[in-house]
Image (tube, helix red, strand yellow):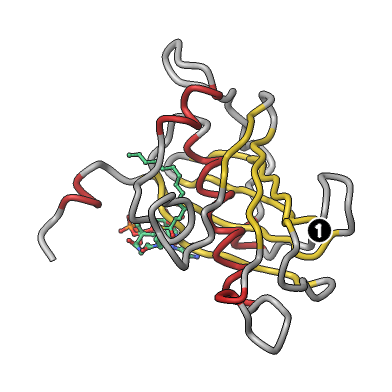
Amino acid sequence: MTASPATTPPPDAAVPPQGMGGISPEDLLQSGGYNGCFGCGEGHESGLRFQRTSADGEAVYGHFTVTEQHQGSPGLAHGGLLATAMDEVLGTAAWSLGRMAVTGRLETDYRIPVPVGSVVHLKAWCTGVDGRKIYLQGEGRIGSPDGPVAIQAAALFLEVSREHFLGER
Ligand SMILES: CCCCCCCCCCCCCC(=O)SCCNC(=O)CCNC(=O)[C@H](O)C(C)(C)COP(=O)(O)OP(=O)(O)OC[C@H]1O[C@@H](n2cnc3c(N)ncnc32)[C@H](O)[C@@H]1OP(=O)(O)O
């Protein structure tokens, strides 16, 4: 993935460790989420139902299955849906650092089409943090964690306070 200048960290940006204040990245992964979330909500009938599976100190991992409700053209996943999946795993990678953040910019490269019925294995990692700016990259592979790369992403997330989510609409 060739990240644009907006999603490339400055050279001196460090990558902080996963986890937060004695909470392991694995525990963080299980603590985040919201049942109504289109990306990860288990109760969302037409959502991705993305399952976060692990964090290994460097990246986070998970998967989802492309259903008929996710089609763009007949039998193939919609591109926006795949970008949503990347948004979800990138957000999970930010959360694995113990940071509450939202997507500011998301860039995607689509490499090969993704058929309905595919299990898409997602992985995301941080490339640097500069103040509130969290730089992330990720990829989605078809069929297995070593399968062909279908989608790649680079993103800039911005750390926000809890009030961002609780403010009046
Ligand atoms: C409870 C816990 C749950 C955990 C769940 C875990 C899993 C979660 C999974 C969920 C996954 C799903 C996740 C989702 O879907 S999150 C939902 C989708 N995203 C949003 O709704 C965000 C909407 N946007 C905003 O709220 C604001 O615009 C934000 C907060 C992003 C920034 O507004 P804010 O007023 O705060 O900051 P600022 O404007 O002063 O900018 C600050 C700096 O940032 C730079 N900048 C900003 N934007 C961009 C840009 N686009 N490209 C390049 N640069 C950008 C800017 O130039 C400046 O740089 P500098 O001048 O300082 O150098």
Quarter holding the N terminus? bottom right
Image check: 115 left or right of 163?
right
Q: Which residue is mark 1?
A: 142
Residue 134 place in picture, x, y as percent: 52, 45
Image check: 71 left or right of 101?
right
* Three-letter code for the amino acid on which mark 1 is drawn: Ile
Q: Secondary structure at mark 1?
A: strand
Query: Quick one: 104 or 8, which is closer to the camera?
Result: 104
Q: Is residue 135 above or below residue 120?
A: above
Q: Residue at x 44, y 49 (%)?
A: 42
Residue 153 place in picture, x, y as percent: 68, 60
**Looking at the image, which residue sits at the far left?**
168
Quarter holding the C terminus? bottom left
The quadrant where residue 129 appears: top right
The quadrant where residue 69 appears: bottom right
Query: Quick one: 135 or 116, which is closer to the camera?
Result: 116
Residue 33 place in picture, x, y as percent: 39, 43
* Mark 1 CB within 8 Å of ligand 1: no
Q: Looking at the image, in which quadrant does ligand 1 appear?
A: bottom left
Query: Quick one: 114 or 166, which is closer to the camera?
Result: 114
Q: Is residue 55 above or below residue 78?
A: above
**Looking at the image, which residue sits at the far bottom?**
73
Q: Residues within 10 Å of mark 1 (few under 14, many from 20)?
A: many
